[in-house]
Image (cartoon, rainbow, N blue to C red):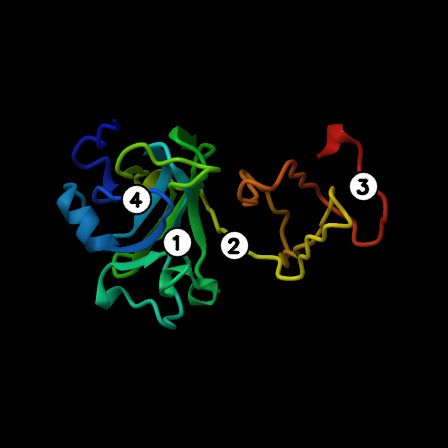
Amino acid sequence: ALDAPPAGEGFQIETPDIQVAQGDEVQNCYFYKVSDLAKAAGLDPTAQFNLHHVEIAQKSGSHHMNVFRVRTIVNLDPKNGTVEGKNGMGECFKSPNWADWPIVANSQEAGKIDWEFPDGVANVFDPDEYLMVQTHWVNASSQKTPEEGKVRINFWHLPKADVKYEMGTIFATKQSIRVCQSNPTPEYSGSCNINSPEPVTIIGANGHFHSRGKQFDIYTWDGTSIDTPPDSDR
């Protein structure tokens, strides 16, 4: 359960009930136009939406839930509506389709997540852009979907006069990963260079390692050191 924001303060996205049979995994891509969401929630559909606070609630069995901002269209087009995928088949399973789509929010667990940005910080959406909500459900031996899948997401709006800093987001995948039987405890690393003339503040980060990942660390790097920093700096 997750109550929607009061009229004029934000909007809620809710997915349909998703049936996941025993032994199946289902990954669907749902598209929503920002102006339509704003209008239905009593906000100005012609104005930018300043996202300042995200709430997520989802049922058990969720493998992950991602919200993306739609950019380059490959084989996932908002004009075609919902795209459903099952057991690895379908365009909603193919990550090149969202290669340059900035991620907005992510959850990999059942229950609720409540993420409020620092004062004055907002992720600014244009009214004519689309959001894509991607839900992934598994009903197998390693993970169960005991009932139908469902997600609710609240996006809270920050008035334009209160926006001091615009937030950007990055979504990246590491392709060169091999898990070999000869190495039961593999480790992987990668770096991301942020080109900015001004200092950058990171307010959130997470990894996505399915059920196999055990630990994820992130830290600033000077570009030359070969040793990782102590745990207190990660």
Give the amino acid at mark 1: Phe
Circle 3 packing at 10 Å, graded few (<14), some (14-19), many (20+), is few
Question: Which amino acid does the dot numbered 3 rest on?
Answer: Thr
Q: Residue at x 70, y 41 (%)?
A: 219
Horizontally, is 91 left or right of 227 in the view?
left
Q: Secondary structure at mark 4?
A: loop
Residue 135 screen position, x and y as percent: 35, 47
Q: Nearer the viewer, residue 198 or 151?
A: 151
Residue at position x 67%, y 61% from top?
176
Sequence-wise first label, 3 or 2 = 2
Q: Amino acid at mark 2?
A: Phe
Q: Quadrant of residue 65?
A: top left
First along the sequence among labels 4 and 2: 4
Q: Which residue is mark 4?
A: 20
In the image, is 187 to the left or to the right of 37? right
- On the image, the x and y values in percent for residue 51 come to 35, 42
Q: Is residue 87 above or below residue 231?
A: below
Mark 2 closeness class: few <14, some 14–19, many ≥20 residues within 10 Å: few
The residue lying at 61 percent from left, 47 percent from top is: 200
Residue indicated by mark 1: 68
Tag 3 and tag 4, C-beta contact below 8 Å: no
Q: What residue sits right under mark 3 in the picture? A: 228
Where disc 2 sits, the SS reads loop
Along the viewing direction, whichever of 166 and 232 lies nearer the viewer: 232
Quarter of the picture holding the C terminus: top right
The kind of residue tagged 4 is Val
Q: Nearer the viewer, mark 3 or mark 4?
A: 4
Residue assigned mark 2: 171
Q: Position of residue 118 (x, y in %)?
A: 47, 33
Question: Under tag 1, what secondary structure?
Answer: strand
Pointer 3 or 1: first along the chain? 1
Q: Are marks 1 and 2 in contact (CB under 8 Å)?
A: yes
